[in-house]
Amino acid sequence: MTHYKLNSSSLKELSARVSVPKYNRENVKSGIVHVGVGGFHRAHEAMYLDQLLHDDSNSNWGICGIALLNFDQKIYNTLKEQDGLYTLVVKELDGTLTKRVIGSIVEYLFAPENPKAVIEKMANPEVKIISLTITEGGYNINEATGEFNLNNPQIIQDSKNPENPTTIFGYLTQTLKLRKEQSAGAITILSCDNIEGNGDVTKKMLLSYIKFAQPDLLDWIKENVSFPNSMVDRITPATMPTDISELKEVSGIEDQWPVVCESFQQWVIEDEFIAGRPNLESVGVQFVKNVAPFEKMKLGLLNAGHSVVGILGSLVGYSTIDEAISDPAIQTFLKNYLDFEVTPILRDLDGMDLTAYKEMLIKRFSNIYIKDQIDRICSETSAKMPKFILPTVFEQLKSNKNISHASFIIAAWAIYSLGFNEKKEAINIKDALAEKLFEKAKIAQTYPTAFLELEEVFGTLSQSEEFNTAFSKAYQKITSFGVKKCLEEMNSNFKNEKQ
């Protein structure tokens, strides 16, 4: 089999092997600038836009990708070499692979190399939407207060050197300033990150920075910028070397960075686009007046579920999500947590079959072909915990309801934060607060609730006597008997209680 390097010139040859863009990419304009072109964006928003661009009437809705951080140099170089093209490999539950080349990213800029070019691009009148996947930790939130962290050295640096920003807030501020000066028109800023009320959070954080750094912009923004909330969903594990070699061997495509994902996909957005939007409903996107109930469902069930399986599985010694969820003790624990602690706080989900959704979650986690690495799922848990699990805890405490499973999960995370699993193997912890977590976890070995005193993660949780008691009990049981034995006992007791 002849091998072809993936780029614009090889599309004709590859079209006989895989699905490729049928539209003329040279005629596509970048109506959307996307910051944070990682695997999820390429499996989700870029995929939806690729579908849409096959209708010539949507040629104004291509994507200009922005690599914001120095860390993004590799993906930037890869996509530049491949003319923005990449292969999306969908791994079905039965092992079937569906491959297609995505062409919706028609421009790509590396912000550290030329900040001015990025600002000018985002301020271009043709650009109607700036979308974001900057991770939960990218919004610079002080979790103890819920406010913008003005003490972040990078934020201070951007306020002093506005022409050479390094953070998303610095870039957006200069973009909006230039759009105002050049009368470039209104724009929508669309967050695609896993944060409840992600549009509201984006607006709050950005306006907090602008009030600090460029207050004369505030009135213009109120009239010319919209921040719709959205809910996104598609499991997208990190690309592995085997994914690259398999694609080359089976399809003859030399793609330096393909994306693998599951078949499930969902995108629910509030229809608040001040400068217009593409006709995404024609490719399956759902537009609603209020996305909050759907966000809460997804964050509390899928994202929290992922973290639960990841933390418990890591401590037991598993390396992938499908391995961990195949453990009956972990799977039963997860089902009980979702049914009896999360589901009771979910409401206003017209048209949603929650039982079917939860059953599908287990199947999605169990997909043996995805091989989602646990260390990816557990990365930056300090930013995820306040978004995925703590809202459930606080609501259950407020209603005097069950918190036994949530307290167990957080106790397990405290032990996980020591950096070793129960086989005495080192855990690869990727977290901006790893050192602080470790310090608190060390103290927790003799004083368990010390772990809860990390306010930037837990807020006021340590003030709850009920939770402190449940947490300490769970912590002591795990350290005495191990995760598996504790899970089996909890599952058995819970089954008896519900009978």
Image (cartoon, rainbow, N blue to C red):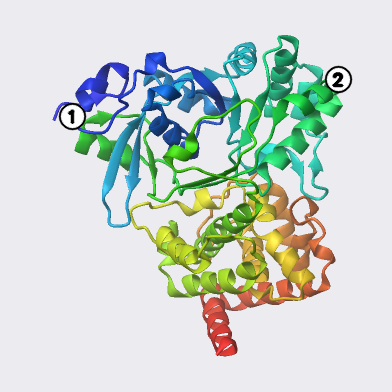
At 61% from the left edge and 14% from the top edge, which residue is drawn? 125
Disc 1 marks which residue? 16
C-alpha span from label 2 to label 1: 56 Å
318 vs 149: above or below: below
Q: Is residue 411 left or right of residue 102?
A: right
77 vs 397: above or below: above
Disc 2 marks which residue? 216
Please state the horizontal and vertical placement of residue 120, each as a whole percent of the image.
63, 12
Please state the horizontal and vertical placement of residue 314, each as a whole percent of the image.
51, 60
Q: Label 1 amino acid?
A: Ala
Residue 423, visible in the rendered structure: no
Asked whether 392 or 243 is in front, the reply is 392
Question: Looking at the rendering, in which quadrant would you find the C terminus?
Answer: bottom right
Q: Is residue 55 left or right of residue 470?
A: left
Asked whether 299 or 49 is in front, the reply is 49
SS at mark 2 in the image: helix
